[in-house]
Amino acid sequence: MDRLMPRRAQKGVALPVALVLLLVMTILGLALVNGSVMQEMMLGNSKDSKLAFQAAETALRDAEQDIAQNITAATSFVQACASGLCTPPSSWSTPKSASISTLIDWTNSGNTRAYGAFTGASALPDVASQPLYVIEKLSGVSVPAGESVGIGVKPPTGGTAYRITVYATGARPETHVVLESIYVKR
């Protein structure tokens, strides 16, 4: 019994050490959770951007089909973009050098064409709103002299070029994608 110390003379360090270790582990755990949440948000944003891009690509194909089926030489294109049929901004009474995507009012349905409205395509799922597009009539396309695609193959004939500008959203309305392409109708 000589070796045993009285109870009040004992000093324990286990509790402070355990509390410090618990605090360190809590901070590490919170850092890992924060990193996981950040990665989840980045993945969600990436997925939504890809969805909006796919919707825009689909709308480009729909607009090409609209041009092939519904646009003729007699179709009227105006500066005011009536029904989404526009003249290029460079030909306006006050010429603009900006892209039509920044000049058009995408909220005005009188200035745009809706996905599927002229082709009968079914609505796209999982997007906040269906894509919109405008068509600009650019000019006739001529075939340069001597152009050919191969021996014994006639060169392509001229045609009319149209610029298609699409505005699409992802699953969230704040995710936007704008795509443009040139389509030549021969």
Image (cartoon, helix red, strand yellow):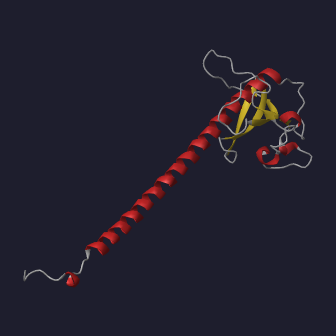
Where in the figure is residue 88, as x and y percent of width and height? Answer: 83, 40
81 to 4, vertically: above or below: above
Name the residue rendered at 82%, 43% in the picture. 107
* Residue 93 in sight here: yes
* Residue 144 in sight here: no
100 to 117, vertically: above or below: below
Q: In the rendered view, does 142 fall on the left or right side of 87?
A: left
* 150 and 182: which is toward the camera: 182
* 119 and 31: which is toward the camera: 31
Q: Looking at the image, which residue sits at the far left? A: 2
Dividing the picture into quadrants, the one containing residue 145 is: top right
Counting the numbered discs, the total is 0
Where in the figure is residue 62, as x and y percent of width and height? Answer: 72, 28
Q: Quadrant of the N terminus?
A: bottom left
* 103 and 2: which is toward the camera: 2
Where in the figure is residue 52, as x and y percent of width and height? Answer: 65, 40
Dividing the picture into quadrants, the one containing residue 186 is: top right
Name the residue rendered at 88%, 27% in the picture. 75
Dividing the picture into quadrants, the one containing residue 69 is: top right
Q: Looking at the image, which residue sits at the far bottom? A: 9
Q: Looking at the image, which residue sits at the far right? A: 93
Where in the figure is residue 135, as x and y percent of width and height? Answer: 80, 34
